Amino acid sequence: NLPTMTEEPSKFGRDLDPVGDKDMPADVGYSEVAKSFDTCCAACVNFIRPHACELVAGNISPVGWCRLFEHMNSMSAAA
């Protein structure tokens, strides 16, 4: 069943995009190796074990880094 033009617009475009709403690694300065373990993906609130991220598309290394990094401890300090 192909969507028709009378169906919801959400059935076209982004829903068919495997990246969805995530940023591409190059767009956020992703590196597979962080400069410090304190700032690596495994310490980020957006990291999803074992190799994913809520914000960045693709296979993400736990020891990687990007500009969207937000330390897990920053969330508990804000509460």
Image (tube, rainbow, N blue to C red):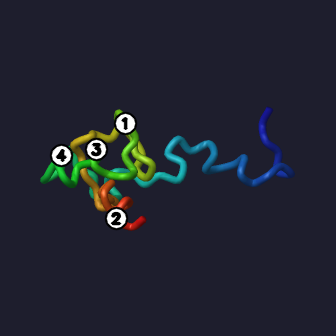
Per the model, the C-alpha gap separating discs 2 and 3 is 18 Å
The residue singled out by tag 2 in the image is 77
Disc with the residue nearer the chain's start (4 vs 3): 4
User: Which of the 4 image quarters holds residue 75?
Assistant: bottom left
Q: Amino acid at mark 2?
A: Ala
Residue at disc 4, secondary structure: loop
Residue at disc 2, secondary structure: helix
Disc with the residue nearer the chain's start (2 vs 3): 3
Disc with the residue nearer the chain's start (2 vs 1): 1
Q: Amino acid at mark 3?
A: Ala
Q: On the rendered structure, is 36 left or right of 62?
A: left
Q: Are marks 1 and 3 in contact (CB under 8 Å)?
A: yes
Disc 3 residue crowd, few under 14, some 14–19, many 20+, Cα 10 Å: many
Q: On the rendered structure, is 36 left or right of 51?
A: left
User: Which of the 4 image quarters holds residue 4?
Assistant: top right
Q: Are marks 2 and 4 in contact (CB under 8 Å)?
A: no
Residue at disc 1, secondary structure: loop
Residue 53 placement (x, y as % from top left): 40, 45
The numbered mark at residue 49 is 1
The structure residue drawn at horizontal position 39% and vertical position 51%, both measured from the top left corner, is 46
Disc with the residue nearer the chain's start (2 vs 4): 4
Per the model, the C-alpha gap separating discs 1 and 3 is 8 Å
The structure residue drawn at horizontal position 22% and vertical position 43%, both measured from the top left corner, is 63
User: Which of the 4 image quarters holds residue 73?
Assistant: bottom left
Residue at disc 3, secondary structure: helix
Residue 68 placement (x, y as % from top left): 34, 60
